[in-house]
Amino acid sequence: MKILFATSEMHPVIKTGGLADVSGGLPNAYAALEHDVRVVLPGYQAVWEKLHDVHKIAEFDIDSCGKRHQVAIKQAAAKGTDAILWIVDIPDLFDRPGNPYLANDGSDWWDNGERFGVFSQVAAELAMDHRGLNWKADLVQANDWQTGLVPAYLSEQLERPSTIFTIHNMAYQGQFPHALFSALRLPWHWWQAEGGVEFHGQMSMLKAGIEMADQVTTVSPTYAREITWPEFAYGLEGVLQRKANEGRLSGIINGIDENVWNPETDPYLPRQYSAAKGRVAARKLNKTELLNRFGWHESEVDLDVPVVGMVGRLVWQKGIDLVTQLIPQILATENVIFAIVGSGDKEFQDALQQLAIQYPKRVLLFLGYSEELAHLVEGGSDMFLMPSRFEPCGLNQIYSLKYGTLPIVHHTGGLADTVVNATEDNIADGSATGFVFYDPSIHALKSTLQHALYLFGKKRTWQAIQKQGMQQAFGWQESATQYLKLIQ
Ligand code: ADP
Ligand code: GLC
């Protein structure tokens, strides 16, 4: 099968979050199943230095929003990726520094609707082989609002590929005024609430994908249920309930790319390890290195003091405000170290910075994006905190399982589907892999962390839970097969 995977970010080329990890892993799994895969990605300024064998394969103009854009399609390869990349190079829209979605001041690029509207149009044209590349897709998978118009454009075509639209996060909907709908010259009959893109007087690109794809998926079975409820769907629950009733909504859990996230081969760790071999000793060494990195002298390091890691976008979704309340309360009574790597909203950055000043050597903080530190936190912490208020899938808790860093998670979305709580029964029958709390409150989080700290002192139990987590199957193969079954 010929599969076109349309995405706005992809590891290792450009990344802001988990979508990049999925785009780096899932197409490889399709390729491993002997499918012919192309990943189509915008040509942001930052991508070029990460690509090799770049060559132009098509050139044309596209009119949108009263302008004529010059478009070049550049085929390329990237390290660790088996799929062929098709980079949509539109300098007017994408040749800008920094984040793919945000200007330097942290606000959305003023023309995001146009940028991703045009990108989606080009992706659909490539899928249909309308630009003379002699390659027509059988299946197109589009991801999140940025590519929501891809299934919509394709729905207008005869003899078109099957379409899957994958929701990675309902919180970002890509809503734009009617003026953009007109400026993109979209078919007038799409402007309707049922079956179309209209949403409370605006155009929603997320809704476009949901309404017009053959199959809608999201990244865990629990989140697939949750988004049919008002608390998680931001007004789209009715549409999603309808899709579920039609048998067109399903949840497929993300895998992880074991070439990137694997303690046996991780180049960022001073010492590699596996569930079977050298785990305990190697983790001590990695923990020491992690603490050294944040200013602890080797002679001061006490390996019996637990390190609680956290890596992620500092946004409300991730429960950062719970963590900033938790830290002083826990440090008042417990001997613990927090190691936090993240970037995001200024209010959370400031609050964490304040704590790092207040508790030197207890709150270890790196504000910014660092792949290296993200790996070191996984490989060197004892436990990993993910108190997300909602979490479509979540990858860091899966990395944590794989690295033997016991995850502490809120029971929601993919967190609920991947971590087995260390209750007495689950410990006894050997199924426990981490710690789960059931309401996103400071009280629940605190008592669960305290339970984890208590079990940390019981080395044999701790190591048994660690081993059980590390032995789970995490690869992409199974999920890739499930996606392909949807369209057969
Ligand atoms: P989300 O996609 O909502 O951000 P996920 O858990 O699915 O959450 O994926 C986040 C990915 O981004 C993980 O690979 C994580 O390690 C990475 N990440 C997030 N913030 C940072 C950061 N500040 N530095 C390095 N990696 C980060
Ligand atoms: C989103 C979600 C996250 C998920 C990722 C990849 O960014 O917030 O839970 O793991 O997409 O699917």
Image (cartoon, helix red, strand yellow):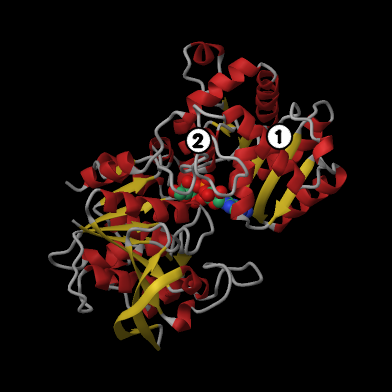
Disc 1 residue lies near ligand 1 with CB under 8 A: no
Residue 169 in view of the camera: no
Query: What is the distance, in whole Å, between disc 1 and disc 2 at their CAs?
Result: 17 Å
Residue at coordinates 85% horizontally, 44% vertically from top-left? 360
Q: Which residue is mark 2?
A: 402
When asked about the image quadrant of residue 305, the answer is top right
418 shown above or below 160: above
Tell whether label 2 touches label 1 (CB within 8 Å).
no
Q: Residues within 10 Å of mark 1 (few under 14, many from 20)?
A: many
Answer with mark 1 or mark 2, whichever residue precedes in sequence: 1
Q: Residues within 10 Å of mark 2 (few under 14, many from 20)?
A: many
Q: Which mark is residue 307?
A: 1
From the viewer's perspective, is 94 left or right of 61?
right
What amino acid type is highlighted by mark number 1?
Val
From the viewer's perspective, is 34 left or right of 352?
left
Of residues 242 and 155, which is closer to you in this image?
A: 155
When asked about the image quadrant of residue 269, the answer is top right
Q: Position of residue 245 (x, y in %)?
A: 27, 40
Residue at coordinates 37% horizontally, 63% vertically from top-left? 147
355 shown above or below 127: above
Q: Position of residue 325 (x, y in %)?
A: 75, 38
Disc 2 residue lies near ligand 1 with CB under 8 A: no
What amino acid type is highlighted by mark number 2?
Lys
At mark 1, the secondary structure is: strand
Of residues 103 and 67, which is closer to you in this image?
A: 103
Of residues 13 and 53, which is closer to you in this image?
A: 53
Outermost residue toward the left in this view: 159
Residue at coordinates 63% horizontally, 34% vertically from top-left? 283
When asked about the image quadrant of residue 476, the answer is top left
Of residues 465 and 345, which is closer to you in this image?
A: 465
408 shown above or below 97: above
Q: Position of residue 317 (x, y in %)?
A: 58, 46
